[in-house]
Image (spheres, helix red, strand yellow):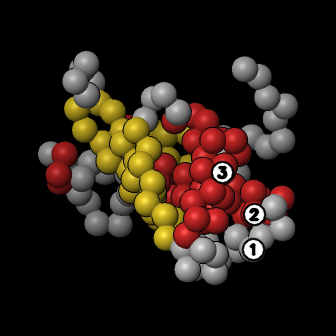
Amino acid sequence: MSIKPLFTATGTATGGRNGHSEAADHSVSFDLSVPKEMGGPGKPGTTTPEHLFACGYAACFDGAIDFVAKQQHKDGSQAVVTCAVSIGPRDGGGFGLAVKMHVKIPNLPKAEAEALVREAHEKICPYSHATRGNVQVDFTVEGS
């Protein structure tokens, strides 16, 4: 599948999970370290690729909900999306990711909130498209 690029973000990493990463436009710059739970030093003031993925997916998915809501003349602006990304060994070797997404849309009934989340996940969010078939993504949805 091809896309017509609207925007391209570029980042560079050096030193892997115990190194540094920065966007080409210098909008983000951060040090990384392997968390203690994975046998690393877990240095204070550092982050992990999983933190970055969780924040990116949550922000993108929140935007997808708002997009779908506007198409349906509903208010998705009060949505709060929390994304938890786990990493661990895969049965087939190597490592894999799992995602748990919690979505709260306090101003809409639960059924309407669930419908917005389903459509955002199935049709709109590029992170959802990228993970589909590769990463287990589980949702919990709250409405009014």
Quadrant placement of the N terminus: top right
Q: Is residue 30 shown above or below 93?
A: below
Residue 21 point in image, percent of width and height? 49, 47
Density class for disc 1 (Cα within 10 Å; few <14, some 14-19, many ≥20) is: some
Is any part of residue 98 visible from this angle? yes
The residue indicated by pointer 3 is 120
Q: Answer yes or no: do the residues labelled 1 and 2 have beta carbons within 8 Å?
A: yes
Q: Secondary structure at mark 3?
A: helix
User: Quadrant of the image for the C terminus?
Assistant: bottom right
Residue 82 location (% of width, % of height): 47, 64
In this orientation, does residue 15 appear?
Answer: no
- Disc 3 and disc 1: Cα gap in Å? 14 Å
- Res 7 quadrant in image: top right
Residue 107, how many percent across, how many down? 63, 81
Give the mark, 3 or 2, whose residue is nearer the N terminus.
Answer: 2
Residue drawn at the location 36% of the way across and 60% of the way down = 46
Residue depicted at x 45% and y 29%: 134
Q: Residue at x 60, y 74 (%)?
A: 109
Q: CA distance from mark 1 to mark 2?
A: 6 Å
To which residue does mark 2 refer? 69
Tell me the element at label 2.
helix
In the figure, is residue 38 to the left or right of 19? left
Q: Amino acid at mark 2?
A: Ala
Dot label at residue 75: 1
Eyeballing the image, is 39 above or below 113?
above
Q: Is residue 106 left or right of residue 51?
A: right
Amino acid type of the residue tagged 3 in the rendering: Ala
